[in-house]
Amino acid sequence: MARVDECADGADVLVVQGGINDIAQGTSLEAAADNLRAMVRRGKQLGLAVVLVDVLPWNNGWPDAEPKIRRLNELIRGIARGEAVQLLPFHDTLEDRERPGRMREKWTSDGDHPSIEGYRLLGELAFRLPEGRYSS
């Protein structure tokens, strides 16, 4: 949140993504959601189109982090509805249907981050947004 203004300088769109770091650092899910909501609101105050992204599956945190990720993603969906911003379902896009809560191995480079193939899928998802659906 402390870097939103600096990061948004010169931008037209602000993409706010829920992160594994909040979960890994033991931040309460409610506090993490409050920070995400504040970033969304700040982006709107700055006149930016805002897109919200949910938390990715985390292979290296599985299985312990999975219920926290799912709960934070529920909170993120609520933020998207309440703030009337588009939500990109990155979690469901990269989740391995045969191993729920984890990314498919070819979609992660290290168990924490997407691989080139994973990022390609996420980029394709973002480019399928209907025109104007992400604007505030």
Image (spheres, helix red, strand yellow):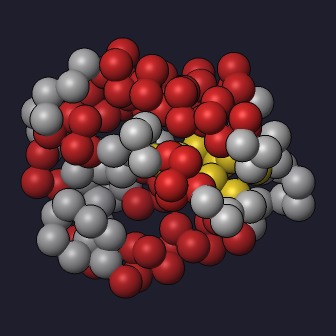
- Foreground: 14 or 73? 14
Percent coordinates x, y for residue 72 in the rendering: 38, 28
x, y percentage for residue 48?
74, 49
Residue 86 seen from this side: no
Quadrant of res 81: top right
**Which one is in front, 133 or 7?**
7
Q: What residue sits 43% from the left and 28% below the top? A: 35
- Number of marks drawn: 0
Q: Can you name the residue that lies furthest to the bottom here? A: 116
Residue drawn where x is 14% and y is 27% of the image: 26
Specify whether 13 is left or right of 23: right
User: Which image quarter: residue 114?
Assistant: bottom left
Residue 44 visible in the displayed image: yes
Q: Residue at x 35, y 27 (%)?
A: 32
In this rendering, is residue 87 above or below 111?
Answer: above
Residue at left offset 50%, top offset 55%: 6
Side (left or right) of 26 relative to 81: left
From this view, report whether residue 29 is shown above or below residue 112: above
Residue 62 appears at what percent x and percent y? 13, 44
In front here: 13 or 91?
Answer: 13
Q: In this view, does 71 lie to the left or right of 34?
A: left
Q: In which quarter of the image is the N terminus?
A: top left
Q: Quadrant of the C terminus?
A: top right
Compared with 11, 84 (above or below) is above
